[in-house]
Image: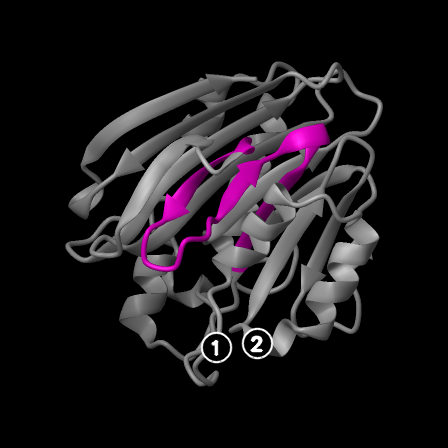
Amino acid sequence: MCLIVFAWRPGHATPLIVAANRDEFYARPSLPLAQWPEAPQVYAGRDLEAGGTWLGIGANGRFAALTNIRNPHQPPARKSRGELVARFLSGDMSIDDYLTDVSRRSLEYAGFNLLVGNARELWHYHALAPEPVLLAAGVYGLSNAGLDTPWPKVLKAKAALSEVLADPQPQALLDLLSDPHTAPFAELPDTGVGLATESLLSSVFIASPSYGTRASTALIVQADGTRVMVERSFGPYGGHLGEVELRI
């Protein structure tokens, strides 16, 4: 997952609104959003290469999502980051206990940002930070650096999310995730991957022959615990592969 924008609004009629794009190589096999047979409380897509996921919901209002930290010089990881989301959604550890466990073992994974929460609280953990952060109410953006790092795509998607919060609907969230426009060269970050790749990755929606946005997900959580989740899947050049809608 390479872009997540979200509104966290405790006490509101819709306390959590999420719009997220998962960017990955098209050749990496995955399954679309569905209920997991071996963990029926979990609703998420699945990475078939390592078994984890990038975003999902679980029992008792659980929510989790992650992005990687873009660093071409980091050493190979022992474990897949996708298990960080899967373990939280399928387990029953408290958020405090879970994040304590993750922080102790964070070096087992390549760099990551992790969001975990429930109906009462939402936390962000950056693998290079000293400790997790309990998030206050607000509109946030997360790509492949720190929370709210002002990359062009993050700023653009946060602004678009703010415009639809008065009446959040899945279609509006999916629309903001579909923006294919790259940022001007002068506004690109330098993460060590070269100018051409920085440009490709600077759009909200990424499309190319081999790498791009594989899934766009809209999640709306109601105050009564009802959740609406819509995921669109894509292939090479952004070709539309299908859509799943769940109301839980």
- Which residue corresponds to the image point at 60% horizontal and 43% vertical from the top-left? 90
Identify the mark nearer the N-term, 1 or 2.
1
Q: Is residue 158 above or below residue 163?
A: below
Instruction: Examine the structure image and report whether residue 47 is included in the region drawn in magenta.
Output: yes
Can residue 179 be seen by looking at this rendering? no
* Residue at screen point 64% across, 48% down: 88
> Where's residue 55, x and y in %?
52, 43
Q: Residue 100, how many percent across, how many down?
A: 79, 64
Q: Is residue 215 left or right of residue 155?
A: left
Graded by Cα atoms within 10 Å as few (under 14), some (14 to 19) or many (20 or more), the crowding at tag 1 reads few
Element type at mark 1: loop
Q: What numbered label is drawn on residue 128?
A: none
Q: Is residue 51 magenta?
A: yes
* Residue 166, image x, y percentages: 66, 17
At 58% from the left and 57% from the top, the residue drawn is 84
Please name the amino acid that badge 1 sits on: Arg
Q: Nearer the viewer, residue 34 or 112?
A: 34
- Residue labelled with disc 2: 108
